[in-house]
Image: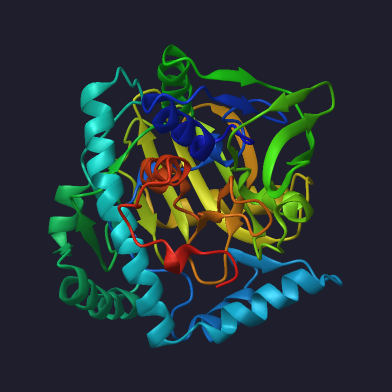
């Protein structure tokens, strides 16, 4: 298993449960990239991909604002412009619906898998079951979302509760007066992601999973007698024999393209978060400020503001302006947008695909090398569904979800 984020941990867990001897190779430390700093929403309501009709126009308009949550750093990057052009081509009703249906199948699977995991394993993740709240400041976008809600109800039988006026402050006292309204998805839940990954790791280790951190993979070698099968993973320090290899490196997966025999169109989408101690008037549930693309999530042990999207390659610069956007947006909605103490300021790279769905497939080069990446902004949500699919592929069993839409080269 190359990659020790939530997708790698989940896949290792399900493989180990089926009797595989699993070794995770992680180039840094497990669970410290996007598996750590995201806002922890298990978004069963997140059917909609980014490639919606009108997304290009609305994004370009947003980029003209100084407080835009979306940015592209100008540079010569053919892979980024290939990605963006393919994204634009998919911003239509037909492609949006196709992606949403694939996400729906994954979300249904992940709901069942999470229920089983949390009931049967000692997972300590600060679980909250209050749902999530999509909050709107202005009447226009609030009413516009009514069309989205009607579409989701019709296509997926997944309703939200409309809340407005005084009822909104009664339902969520942390919100300021005068907001247009909100849509509540009671089916969603949330976790503290770093706790989830750490706890899931312990469970996996209890099943015999071995984890080697600070281990950089140099290459994957073919069987000298069968070029379609990989038999060795070469790291900086050793050679490891393997019957099956899984590449689950998130946004870093494209660095393995040569070894996978393909060019995965995955772009790093840089996100930011600020973790604080809880304000005295803390939200009861995750709040998604839809017009500003910022999320506020309460944990038992803290509080987090996060989101924004920056296409800047593998940029490691600490951009204070992006962090400021989080707090500025929260001030528009919350009585207490910040907690008393800041505990961590974080950024990480999401693995973004231009159609909003992941790649879960065998590599074109090796039949026994599997790929699981491109989970966009719902990696922590889709982790158990992905892990089960990887275990099914490794065992040469029929996947419980049609993988054709998730194939490499689609």
- State whether residue 341 is above or below residue 89: above
Q: Position of residue 306 (x, y in %)?
A: 51, 47
Q: Position of residue 249 (x, y in %)?
A: 63, 43
What residue sits 85% from the left and 70% below the top? 75
Q: Position of residue 318 (x, y in %)?
A: 75, 44
The mark tally for this picture is: 0
Colour scheme of the rendered structure = rainbow
What is the quadrant of residue 22 in the picture? top right
- State whether residue 391 is above or below residue 82: above
Left or right position of 161 against 127:
left
What is the quadrant of residue 98 in the picture? bottom left
Left or right position of 146 against 296:
left
What residue sits 75% from the left and 60% below the top? 312
Along the line of sight, the residue nearer the viewer: 355 or 337: 355
- State whether residue 289 is above or below residue 370: below
What residue sits 38% from the left and 86% below the top? 93
Residue 137 can be seen, yes or no: no
Where, quadrant-wise, is the C terminus in this rendering? bottom right
Left or right position of 357 against 325:
left
Along the line of sight, the residue nearer the viewer: 160 or 21: 21
Along the line of sight, the residue nearer the viewer: 396 or 23: 396
Q: Position of residue 284 (x, y in %)?
A: 26, 39
Where, quadrant-wise, is the N terminus in this rendering? top right
Single out the residue that lies furthest toward the front: 225
Residue 36 can be seen, yes or no: yes
Along the line of sight, the residue nearer the viewer: 73 or 179: 73
């Amino acid at each position: 298993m190359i990659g020790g984020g939530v997708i790698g941990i989940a896949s290792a867990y399900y493989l180990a449960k089926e009797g595989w001897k699993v070794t995770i190779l992680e180039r840094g430390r497990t669970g410290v990239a996007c598996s750590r700093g995201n806002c922890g929403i298990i978004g069963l309501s997140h059917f909609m991909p980014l490639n919606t009709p009108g997304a290009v126009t609305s994004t370009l308009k947003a980029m003209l604002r100084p407080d835009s949550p979306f940015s592209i750093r100008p540079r010569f990057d053919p892979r980024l412009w290939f990605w963006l052009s393919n994204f634009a081509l998919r911003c239509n009703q037909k492609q949006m619906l196709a992606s949403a249906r694939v996400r729906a199948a994954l979300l249904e699977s992940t709901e069942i898998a999470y229920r089983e995991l949390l009931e049967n394993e000692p997972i300590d993740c600060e679980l909250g079951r209050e749902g999530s709240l999509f909050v709107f400041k202005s009447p226009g976008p609030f009413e516009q979302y009514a069309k989205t809600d009607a579409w989701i109800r019709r296509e997926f039988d997944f309703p939200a509760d409309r809340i407005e006026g005084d009822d909104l402050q009664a339902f969520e006292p942390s919100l300021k007066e005068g907001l247009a309204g909100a849509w509540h998805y009671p089916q969603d839940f949330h976790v503290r992601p770093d706790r989830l990954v750490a706890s899931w790791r312990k469970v996996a280790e209890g099943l015999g999973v071995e984890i080697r951190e600070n281990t950089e993979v140099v290459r994957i070698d073919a069987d000298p007698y069968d070029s379609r099968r990989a038999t060795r993973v070469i790291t900086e320090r050793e050679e490891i024999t393997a019957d099956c290899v899984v590449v689950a490196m998130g946004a870093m997966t494209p660095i393995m393209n040569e070894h996978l025999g393909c060019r995965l169109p995955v772009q790093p989408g840089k996100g930011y978060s600020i973790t604080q101690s809880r304000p005295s008037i803390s939200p009861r549930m995750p709040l998604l400020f839809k017009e500003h693309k910022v999320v506020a999530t309460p944990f038992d042990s803290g509080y987090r503001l996060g989101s924004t999207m920056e296409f800047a390659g593998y940029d490691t610069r600490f951009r204070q302006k992006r962090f400021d956007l989080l707090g500025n947006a929260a001030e528009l909605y919350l009585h207490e947008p910040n907690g008393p103490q800041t505990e961590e300021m974080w950024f990480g790279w999401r693995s973004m695909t231009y159609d909003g769905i992941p790649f879960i497939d065998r590599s074109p080069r090796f039949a026994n090398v599997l790929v699981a990446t491109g989970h966009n902004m719902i990696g922590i949500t889709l982790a158990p569904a992905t892990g089960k699919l990887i275990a099914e592929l490794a065992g040469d069993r029929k996947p419980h979800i049609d993988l054709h839409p998730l194939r490499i080269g689609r």
